[in-house]
Amino acid sequence: MFKLLLAGDGGQGIQLLSNIICESAFEKGLEVTHIPNYGLEQRGGVSLAFIKIDDNKIVYPKFTTPDLMLVMSDQARERVENHFGEKQEVLDIKDFKETLVGKGIISRSYNIFFLGKIFKILLEKELIDINFAKNYLKNKLSSKPGFEDNLKALEFGFKL
């Protein structure tokens, strides 16, 4: 079983990322649970997504400590501080900000950069179908402004 917790501010695309991850794992034939968590304010409040992926039936979807956690803002970091554990991987925007700016990744593509990093981790664990994931992302975002920036961010995240 693999557990992910995605955390960011409303409007940063946390729920979009969780949908892409869940659909990609499901397409590979795995069991997936997704618990979205966001306030009424949707934009500006903290948005969370709790995801479990397993090849066996998932009986109970909740968890406290994820295997992988994405933190996209200071506000989100405060909200998930009780979910930090000793044996987890944490992707925290504060650790990548300088690299992202230096590489010319625009702020609205930061979430897609992290999706690239998450794709790489999940692919190494054989938890997603990468071709489906990329096509799903293309179908969801290709008509939106800045799609080329998103592709650049995705590839950079996957390679870094």
Image: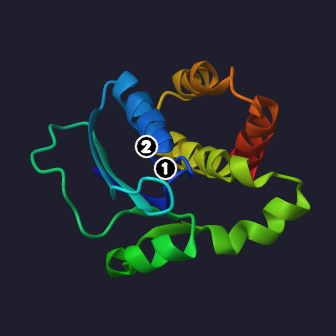
Label 1: how many Cα within 10 Å (few below 14, some 14–19, many 20+): many
Tell me the SS state at disc 1: helix
Residue drawn at (53%, 40%), measured in percent from left and top?
123
Residue type at mark 1 is Ile
Vertical position of residue 51 compared to residue 82: above or below: above
Residue type at mark 2 is Ser
Label 2: how many Cα within 10 Å (few below 14, some 14–19, many 20+): many
Verify CB contact (< 8 Å) between mark 1 and mark 2: yes
Which of pointers 1 and 2 indicates the residue nearer the eye?
Answer: 1
Q: Percent position (x, y) of residue 72?
A: 57, 64
Residue drawn at (33%, 55%), measured in percent from left and top?
40
Whether residue 2 is visible to the viewer of this picture, yes or no, is yes
Q: Which mark is residue 18?
A: 2
Whether residue 126 is visible to the viewer of this picture, yes or no, is no
Q: Percent position (x, y) of residue 62?
A: 19, 57
Answer with the quarter of the image where residue 74 lies. bottom right
In this view, which residue lies farthest toward the front?
Answer: 41
Q: Is residue 112 left or right of residue 160?
A: left
Q: Percent position (x, y) of residue 92?
A: 59, 69
Vertical position of residue 125 compared to residue 87: above or below: above
In this view, which residue lies farthest toward the left?
Answer: 59
Q: Which mark is residue 141?
A: none
Comparing 64 with 10, the one in front is 10
Q: How is the image coloured?
A: rainbow
Comparing 78 with 99, the one in front is 78
Identify residue for label 1. Answer: 14
Residue drawn at (16%, 43%), measured in percent from left and top?
58
Q: Is residue 134 left or right of residue 56?
A: right
